[in-house]
């Protein structure tokens, strides 16, 4: 789960990481009020995607009039498909130097990794590619946590003269990373200003598997992705016309690959996960078929934890309401029972993933 | 004989009385696995599916002397179950549970280095040696004893491929799923090493997917192997995955895509199959050149 910049900065504040004074607003009047209090400000679109600056979602306003005009413009924007509903109005802080500080998980090393760069800002990925000497990475042992000396060494690399101040921020960000089950905690840029080191931006991504032990509130969007997630499944919308429902992410990807190989274009990725029951399969069919682009649906279940008769029961419950052709492949646990149930309803059946993939492409493109 | 387990392997089930634990215990018993006991805190003293249930792994170990355990405990408690198994000296721990927080898994993996336990998974289907034993959740009827080692990051895709091999008369020495989570216990290289040293295994099928670098990391090892390895990578048609901010992009530097993995294998001269049925064809080519 990605956090908004303002939400991440609220956490920074709790951990005493310096951030600019700010106010969160949702209309132009709010921006005017905030600018009157804060003076020279920066208006920042609150959207869960990168590239806000390049899209024009960040603007400086030196007075209330400028704040109003910019707020009106940015609040009407859509950035990479995300409508801007909120603005963070922050006091402007002149950066003397911009740096980068990020903590993520190194899958290979199975440990947190801290990265810092003396060059920060929007082009950090370019710096990583072209001037790797400007970046250093340091692993942290998961059982000992971050040692003071590690934070000191990273800080010295960034700015020897501000070593103590920066080391303190690194230690706090690491604490945030651990306490909040982060996949990413990032400050880009972390800036040196007249009055000290300050976090100008904040990005946090929380491990979805750990949300049960935190109280982050997810925004209701009612997207198919979200409905799927609430049902314990994962859904990713794509731009084709073949609806796909599969148990297991690996088999789901293989199924999409095969649909593509046979000339079809998947409308979605959907993993109903191991152990899916009838209700989940039914919900999955409802979600996938609600996409108006979908012309035909492939359901590919290889039962291990998932039982084929359960899946069949879910399909049968909703099948009469689905006005699109469906082809089903059931193998594995209780496959005989499942197939027998579907047989009575005249649903298209396939014996393998490849056969089902070929079949669904034909059903979607009748000649 | 296959790798890691055989028909003598004594297994306890953590979470034996739960819905999945109960169902899968029965399936494993039907397969011929020597299930010797189970653990569910608070349910100790009862007998379940003809084996004794204990309140703790410690009691189960004292009474049943297991070599391995399999974990069906919900994700909130699964890391604790792995620690409990390792602290009681269980050599092979197969964790089926999906959805364990990644921070928990980092701590678990770091801790396991200080023990002699091997963790398989989490979020994995387990291991099957046809004709001998099965620990985990792979469907019983799909296996056939033979000489192909199968290793995969996926669950159901493993079943798909094992089933297809069996239907084509190609038996397996061992089928093993290492799990799909970003941080897990046993790597592709660990399993490839075991297959390389296993006289029953003549060739290996390795099934990878997008994300991470687990596949790329195995290339150097595969090049040094005496046995042929056929790889299959899924996710060619998948959209670019979620990038974990800039930090993720910096770490991965463009690796992790299916195209990148396939190219890396092909450049190293390793066979890449285009589909499950192509895996079968590649194996048949090796047998009957």
Image (cartoon, rainbow, N blue to C red):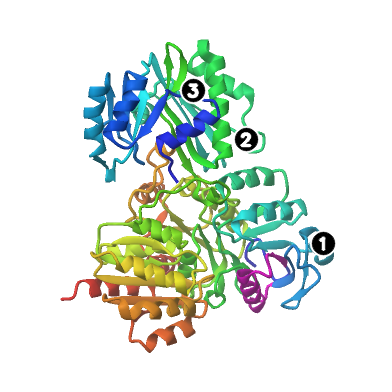
Q: Which residue lies furthest to the right in this view?
A: B62
The subunit letter for the residue under badge 1 reads B
Give the residue displayed 77% in from the left and 59% down from the top.
Answer: B57
Say if B29 sits above or below A236 in the image. below
Label 3, on which residue?
A18
Specify whether A318 is left or right of B123: left
Residue B50 picture location, percent across and down: 75, 78
Specify whether A14 is left or right of A52: right
Residue A141 is tagged as: 2
Q: Is mark 2 on a helix, strand or loop?
A: loop
The local crowd at label 3, few if under 14, some if 14 to 19, many if 20 or more residues have their Cα within 10 Å, is: some
Residue A100 picture location, percent across and down: 43, 25
Q: Give the range drawn in magenta.
A: B10-33
| Image quadrant containing the C terminus of chain B | bottom left
The local crowd at label 1, few if under 14, some if 14 to 19, many if 20 or more residues have their Cα within 10 Å, is: some
Compute the Cα span from label 1 to label 2: 32 Å
Residues flagged by tags 3 and 1 on a common chain: no
Residues flagged by tags 1 and 2 on a common chain: no
Label 1, on which residue?
B59
Q: Which residue lies furthest to the left in this view?
A: A367
The subunit letter for the residue under badge 3 reads A
């Amino acid at each position: 789960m990605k956090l908004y910049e303002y939400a991440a900065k609220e956490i920074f504040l709790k951990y005493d990481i310096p951030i600019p004074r700010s106010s969160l607003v949702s209309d132009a009047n709010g921006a005017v009020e905030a600018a009157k209090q804060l003076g020279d400000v920066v208006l920042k679109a609150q959207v869960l995607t990168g590239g806000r600056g390049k899209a024009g979602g960040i603007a400086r306003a030196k007075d209330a009039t400028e704040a109003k005009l910019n707020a009106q413009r940015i609040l009407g924007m859509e950035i990479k498909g995300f409508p801007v509903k909120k603005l963070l109005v922050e006091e402007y802080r002149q950066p003397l130097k911009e740096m980068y500080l990020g903590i993520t998980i190194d899958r290979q090393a199975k440990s947190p990794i801290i990265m810092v760069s003396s060059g920060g800002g929007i082009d950090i990925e370019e710096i990583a590619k072209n001037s790797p000497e400007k970046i250093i990475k340091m692993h942290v042992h998961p059982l000992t946590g971050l040692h003071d000396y590690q934070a000191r060494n990273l800080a010295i690399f960034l700015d020897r003269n501000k070593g103590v101040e920066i080391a303190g921020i690194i230690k706090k960000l690491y604490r945030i990373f651990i306490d909040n089950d982060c996949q990413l905690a990032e400050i880009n840029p972390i800036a040196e200003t007249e009055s000290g080191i300050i976090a100008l931006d904040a990005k946090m991504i929380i491990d979805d598997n750990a949300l049960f032990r935190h109280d982050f509130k997810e925004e209701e969007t009612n997207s198919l992705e979200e409905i799927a997630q609430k049902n314990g499944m994962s859904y990713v919308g794509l731009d084709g016309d073949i609806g796909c429902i599969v148990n297991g992410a690996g088999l789901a990807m293989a199924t999409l690959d095969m649909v593509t190989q046979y000339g079809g274009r998947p409308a979605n990725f959907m993993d109903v996960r191991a152990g899916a029951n009838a209700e989940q399969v039914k919900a999955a069919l409802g979600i996938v078929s609600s996409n108006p682009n979908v012309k035909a649906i492939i359901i590919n279940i290889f039962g291990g934890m998932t039982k084929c008769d359960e899946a069949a029961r879910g399909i049968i419950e909703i099948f009469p309401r689905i006005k699109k052709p469906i082809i089903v492949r059931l193998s594995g646990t209780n496959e005989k029972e499942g197939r027998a149930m579907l047989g009575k309803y005249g649903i298209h059946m396939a014996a393998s993933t490849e056969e089902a993939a070929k079949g669904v492409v034909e059903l979607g493109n009748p000649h | 004989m296959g790798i890691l387990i055989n028909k003598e392997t004594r297994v306890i089930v953590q979470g034996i009385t739960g819905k999945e634990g109960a169902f899968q215990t029965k399936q494993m018993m039907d397969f011929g696995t020597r299930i010797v006991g189970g653990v569910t805190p608070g349910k100790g003293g009862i007998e379940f599916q003809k084996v004794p249930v204990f309140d703790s792994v410690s009691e189960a170990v004292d009474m049943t002397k297991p070599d391995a355990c399999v974990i069906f405990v919900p994700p909130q408690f699964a890391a604790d179950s792995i620690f409990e198994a390792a602290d009681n000296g269980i050599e092979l721990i197969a964790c089926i549970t999906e959805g364990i927080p990644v921070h928990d898994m980092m701590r678990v993996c770091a801790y396991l280095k200080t023990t002699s336990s091997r963790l398989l998974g989490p979020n994995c289907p387990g291991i099957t040696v046809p004709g001998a034993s099965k620990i985990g959740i792979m469907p019983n009827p799909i296996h056939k004893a033979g000489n192909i080692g199968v290793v995969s990051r996926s669950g159901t895709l493993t079943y798909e491929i094992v089933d297809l091999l069996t239907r084509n008369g190609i038996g397996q020495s061992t089928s093993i799923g290492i799990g799909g989570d970003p941080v897990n216990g046993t790597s592709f290289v660990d399993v490839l090493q075991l297959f390389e040293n296993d006289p029953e295994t003549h060739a290996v099928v390795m099934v990878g997917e997008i994300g991470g670098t687990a596949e790329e990391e195995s290339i150097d090892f595969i090049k040094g192997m005496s046995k042929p390895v056929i790889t299959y990578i899924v996710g060619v048609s998948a959209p670019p995955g979620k990038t974990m901010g800039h930090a993720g992009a910096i770490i991965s530097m463009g690796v992790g895509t299916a195209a990148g993995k396939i190219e890396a294998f092909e450049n190293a001269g390793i066979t890449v199959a285009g589909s499950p049925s192509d895996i079968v064809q590649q194996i048949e080519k090796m047998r009957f050149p």
